Image (tube, rainbow, N blue to C red):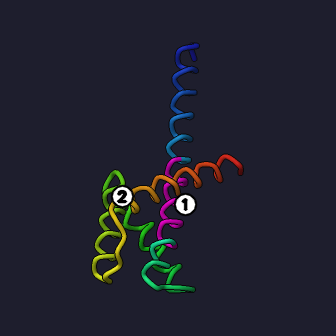
Amino acid sequence: MTTFDKREEGFEKRFALDEETRFKALARRNKKLGLWAAEKLGLSGEAAEAYAKEVVVADLEEAGDEDVFRKLRTDFDAKGVVVSDHQIRRNMDEFLAAAATEMKAG
């Protein structure tokens, strides 16, 4: 194996690890986001946990964050909960930062 091949393999492993870490951080963010939304929707206990799982699964519909945003927006509107688009997106960003920090901390 040449030095170039070794470097390429190293980059591929690093990329795979980065993608796995990103996936886990997004899943953690989505759970936090789901629990926050559940509280706004008046859910608690097992119902809140189940809703948080729905939010995590919603992120698997398409690439990006729009699927999660759309779920929350639709659910808030259906229940008459007043939360701005800006607040939803801000919480998405804040919970992602918190999840990334938690992941780094171990």
Q: Nearer the viewer, residue 17 or 22?
A: 22
Whole-percent x, y for residue 19 in the image: 50, 43
Judged left or right of residue 78, residue 51 is: right
Q: For the N terminus, which image quadrant? A: top right
The disc, 2 or 1, on the residue closer to the chain's N-terminal end is: 1
Whole-percent x, y for residue 14 in the image: 56, 34
Amino acid, disc 1: Arg
SS at mark 1?
helix
Query: How far is the residue under mark 2 from the one under mark 1?
Result: 21 Å
Q: Residue drawn 43% across and 56% down? A: 90
Q: Is residue 40 above or below residue 11?
A: below
Q: Residue furthest top?
A: 3
Mark 1 lies on residue: 28
SS at mark 2?
helix
Q: Nearer the viewer, residue 17 or 70?
A: 70
| Membership of 27 in magenta stretch | yes
Which residues are the magenta region?
22-35
Whether pointer 2 and pointer 1 mark residues with C-beta atoms closer than 8 Å, the reply is: no
The secondary structure making up most of the magenta span is: helix
Judged left or right of residue 61, residue 11 is: right
Q: Residue drawn 54% across and 54% down? A: 24
| Membership of 63 in magenta stretch | no
Q: Residue drawn 38% across and 61% down? A: 59
Judged left or right of residue 17, residue 86 is: left
Amino acid, disc 2: His
Whole-percent x, y for residue 91 in the image: 47, 59
Task: Tell me the crowding category of disc 1: few under 14, some 14 to 19, or many 20 or more residues within 10 angstroms, Cα based.
Answer: many
Mark 2 lies on residue: 86
Judged left or right of residue 67, residue 1 is: right
